[in-house]
């Protein structure tokens, strides 16, 4: 994303859904949000719903979301390349 001149904000691992939502209302709201999960144990639909409530494009990235019922409007990106293509 940096190579494309796209600003990013990294929150890190194990961020509570409420903190994700709060970060989306600070400063300038993002155009898109990517929530990455490598494992289904860390893939929480509640976090996707909170992120989607901010109006941004929400991508569920990584293998952890595979096979899950995603909230309306959330798009699955199975790889980093897929996510980059969807954000282009």
Image: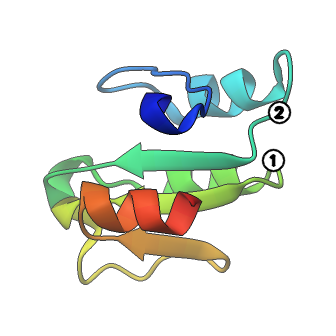
Q: Where is residue 84 in the image (x, y as percent from the top left)?
A: 42, 57
Quadrant where the C terminus is found in the figure:
bottom right
Q: Residues within 10 Å of mark 1 (few under 14, many from 20)?
A: some
Number of numbered tags placed on the structure image = 2
Q: What element carries label 1?
A: loop
Q: Where is residue 17 in the image (x, y as percent from the top left)?
A: 54, 36
Q: What element carries label 2?
A: loop
Mark 2 or mark 1, earlier in chain: 2
Q: In this view, does 62 lie to the left or right of 72?
A: left
Quadrant in the rendering for residue 57: bottom right
Q: In front: 27, or 5?
A: 5
Q: In this view, does 42 lie to the left or right of 44?
A: left
Question: Mark 2 highlights which residue?
Answer: 29
Query: Residue sitting at 17 percent across and 65 percent down?
Result: 63
Q: How crowded is mark 2: few (under 14 residues within 10 Å), some or many (20 or more)?
A: few
Residue 77 seen anywhere in this rendered image of the structure: yes
Q: Position of residue 8 (x, y in %)?
A: 56, 26
Name the disc covering residue 54, or none: 1
Q: Is residue 73 above or below residue 33?
A: below
Query: Residue sitting at 24 percent across and 63 percent down?
Result: 79
Query: Residue sitting at 58 percent across and 71 percent down?
Result: 74
The reply to whether the C-beta atoms of the residues labelled 2 and 1 are less than 8 Å apart is: yes
In the rendered image, the residue lying farthest to the top is: 27
Q: Nearer the viewer, mark 2 or mark 1?
A: 2
Quadrant in the rendering for residue 28: top right
Query: Residue sitting at 29 percent across and 25 percent down?
Result: 13
Quadrant in the rendering for residue 6: top right
């Amino acid at each position: 994303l940096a190579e494309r001149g796209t600003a990013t904000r990294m929150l890190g691992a194990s961020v509570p859904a409420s903190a994700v939502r709060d970060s989306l209302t600070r400063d300038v709201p993002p155009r898109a949000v990517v929530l990455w999960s490598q494992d289904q144990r860390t893939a929480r639909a509640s976090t996707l719903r909170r992120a989607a409530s901010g109006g941004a494009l929400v991508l569920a990235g990584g293998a952890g979301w595979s096979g899950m019922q995603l909230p309306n409007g959330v798009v699955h990106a199975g790889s980093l390349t897929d996510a980059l293509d969807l954000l282009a």
